[in-house]
Amino acid sequence: MQLLDPPHLDADVWDLTVRGHDFLERLDSQFNFEAIHPPKVVNMTETKMTVFISHASADQALAAALARLLRSAFNLPTNEIRCTSVDEFRLPAGADTNDQLRREVRESKVFVGIITPSSIQSAYVLFELGARWGAQMSLFPVLARGAGSQHLKGPLNGINALNLTNPQLVKRLLEDIADKANLSLERQSTLDTEVSKVVAEAEKVEQEGQPLPPTKKPLGKESQKVLVHLFKFSHGQSVEGISRGLSMPLNVSKYHRDQLLQAGLVEEGMDEDLFPIYSLSVSGRAWVVEHGPNGF
């Protein structure tokens, strides 16, 4: 691209200095360079994730079988499938967990949400499903382990969910994913073994999760303080919020959080930005009510 010649001006009225000539030459050179080498547009939020499987930790075996089926069905490398509880599909070492999961939930080509009696009680699964739905991206909820259409709440109620206990519906899921995500599907006759493994895990019916009874293990005073503190925040708090609220060192707050998680008195969820937050479980709330929030 060449600069247009400026309109003729009377030299007695206008006259370029040496610096003016240098400036125009530099400008002309810049335009010519950019025309030949246009700047690259970099998408900083681009992710290479193809499949994201949202699931509860209690459904690890089913999630693993489904992840391996999808890997075989679409001939995908393991690093294009995210299934956080299965070794070969975990996050890479050193990854910023919250940031990467937040992007992958919203940007993966395929998002499969495993709906079971356990997963509908998992705050992580509910937040992941909500984030995907809110991003208006394709969403494939699937039913398993005794879950039915009655388990689909809110916006998910309007989405057709296939049941993984039926091998024909598992194959239909593969076809739907191939169509929606523009993926090449391997011949289904070669996938029968993998499909059977998914069906076998999906048929392992679990009972509706029942709240754990209050723990019989004595709680230390500091853990009690964390429990009572969370009683006042029904929406949940981050571990940093617990630390600030109780003027407690962060590493100490993390220790007592872990103790309460292991005791079943606290459960982990995610806030609207997909950062971990902690709130009382049914058992934790019962513990505080039984002992009295001001009893220690």
Image (cartoon, rainbow, N blue to C red):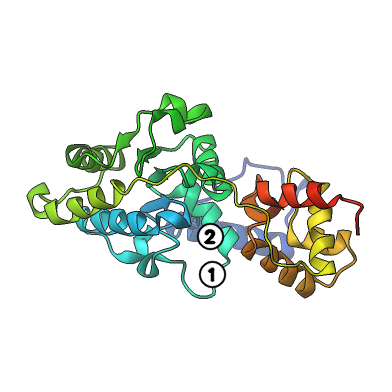
Question: Which residue carries the number 1 mark?
Answer: 95
Mark 1 and mark 2: span between their CA atoms?
A: 7 Å
| Residue closest to the eye, 269 or 38 | 269
Give the class, few, some or many, for how many residues have Cα within 10 Å of label 2's Cα (few <14, many ≥20).
some
Query: Where is residue 274 shown, x and y percent of the image?
Result: 62, 51
Query: Which residue is the extreme one toward the left?
Result: 189
Element under disc 1: loop
Give the class, few, some or many, for how many residues have Cα within 10 Å of label 1's Cα (few <14, many ≥20).
few
Residue at horizontal 84 percent and vertical 73 percent from the top: 249
| Residue closest to the eye, 261 or 29 | 261
Element under disc 2: helix
In this picture, residue 149 sits left or right of residue 273: left
In this picture, residue 273 sits left or right of residue 81: right
**Residue 277: which quarter of the image?**
bottom right
**Quadrant occupied by the C terminus:** bottom right
Which comes sooner in the sequence, label 1 or label 2?
Answer: 1
Residue at horizontal 76 percent and vertical 48 percent from the top: 14
**Residue 261: which quarter of the image?**
bottom right
For the question of whether residue 275 can be seen, the reply is no
For the question of whether residue 137 can be seen, the reply is yes
What amino acid does circle 2 point to?
Gln
Query: Where is residue 17 shown, x and y percent of the image?
Result: 75, 60
Question: Which residue carries the number 2 mark?
Answer: 100
What amino acid does circle 1 point to?
Ala
In this picture, residue 203 sits left or right of residue 90: left
Query: Where is residue 4 shown, x and y percent of the image?
Result: 54, 45
